[in-house]
Image: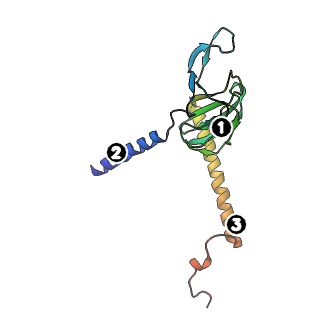
């Protein structure tokens, strides 16, 4: 029973710590100008169009932060999003940050909620400086493909590092000092 209590307490603390690590907005301040759903096309077509995220108006250059810790999945220009940063948070969850004036991260980079990933702007299909913030869930097939890709990348990185360590050890460039594992009377 005591073990169960410890596990439950740890789970609650972990959940609380995760919640505290999250940001509620990718920017400090700003004005929410649009949310997800149907809206009147802001480019004057007169039609109702689907909008897939939240637009937060802020001055150009405002720091943009990820709302959860993760790994940069994409960073660069992309269609109507303009300069886009996509952060992967695990379990196929992605957050998108669009219309940036400047991108400050690279794909594969680990980021936390204190990392400035971009500066807000008005690139792409945009009517003024703001951050377009979006949350997406990759379909199951893409999640499996991504897991396999990451597993292969990790395996390759580990193998490369091990090969380097072995080579360094064999050539005397690395590894522990032989005096730390050879018997003291060896050179007598």
- Give whichever of discs 2 and 1 has the lower sequence position: 2
Q: Secondary structure at mark 3?
A: helix
Name the residue rendered at 68%, 30% in the picture: 121
Residue at image mark 3: 167
Q: Nearer the viewer, mark 3 or mark 1?
A: 1
Instruction: Give how far apart the Cα atoms at labels 3 and 2 are.
Output: 46 Å
Q: Nearer the viewer, mark 3 or mark 2?
A: 2
Q: In front here: 69 or 108?
A: 69
List x then y, in percent, for residue 160. Answer: 68, 57
Image height of 36 relative to 45, above or below:
below
Q: Residues within 10 Å of mark 3 (few under 14, many from 20)?
A: some
Residue sticking out furthest to the left: 1
Q: Secondary structure at mark 1?
A: strand
Name the residue rendered at 56%, 17% in the picture: 37
Instruction: Give how far apart the Cα atoms at labels 3 and 1 are.
Output: 40 Å
**Disc marking residue 118:** 1
List x then y, in percent, for residue 144. Answer: 58, 37
Instruction: State which quadrant residue 181 falls in.
Output: bottom right
**Is residue 116 found left or right of 23 in the rendered image?**
right
Image height of 3 relative to 180, above or below:
above
Tell me whether the residue at label 2 lies in contact with that at label 1, contact meaning CB atoms closer than 8 angstroms: no
Instruction: State which quadrant residue 106 falls in.
Output: top right
Residue at image mark 2: 8
């Amino acid at each position: 029973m005591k073990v169960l209590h410890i596990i439950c307490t740890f789970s609650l603390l972990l959940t609380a710590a995760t919640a505290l690590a999250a940001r509620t907005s990718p920017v400090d301040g700003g004005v929410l100008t649009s949310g997800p759903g149907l809206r009147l096309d802001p480019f004057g077509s007169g039609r109702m169009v689907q909008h897939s995220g939240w637009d937060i108006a802020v001055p150009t250059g405002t720091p943009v932060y990820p709302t959860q810790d993760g790994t940069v999945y994409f960073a660069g220009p992309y269609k109507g999003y303009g300069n886009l940063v996509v952060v992967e948070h695990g379990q196929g969850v992605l957050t998108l940050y669009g219309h940036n004036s400047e991108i400050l991260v690279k794909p594969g980079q680990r980021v936390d909620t204190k990392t400035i990933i971009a500066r807000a702007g008005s690139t792409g299909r945009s009517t003024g400086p703001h951050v377009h913030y979006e949350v997406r869930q990759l379909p199951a097939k893409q999640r499996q493909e991504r897991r396999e890709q990451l597993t292969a990348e990790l395996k390759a990185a580990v193998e490369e590092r091990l090969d380097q360590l072995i080579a360094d050890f064999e050539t005397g460039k690395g590894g522990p000092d032989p005096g730390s594992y050879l018997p003291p009377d060896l050179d007598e």
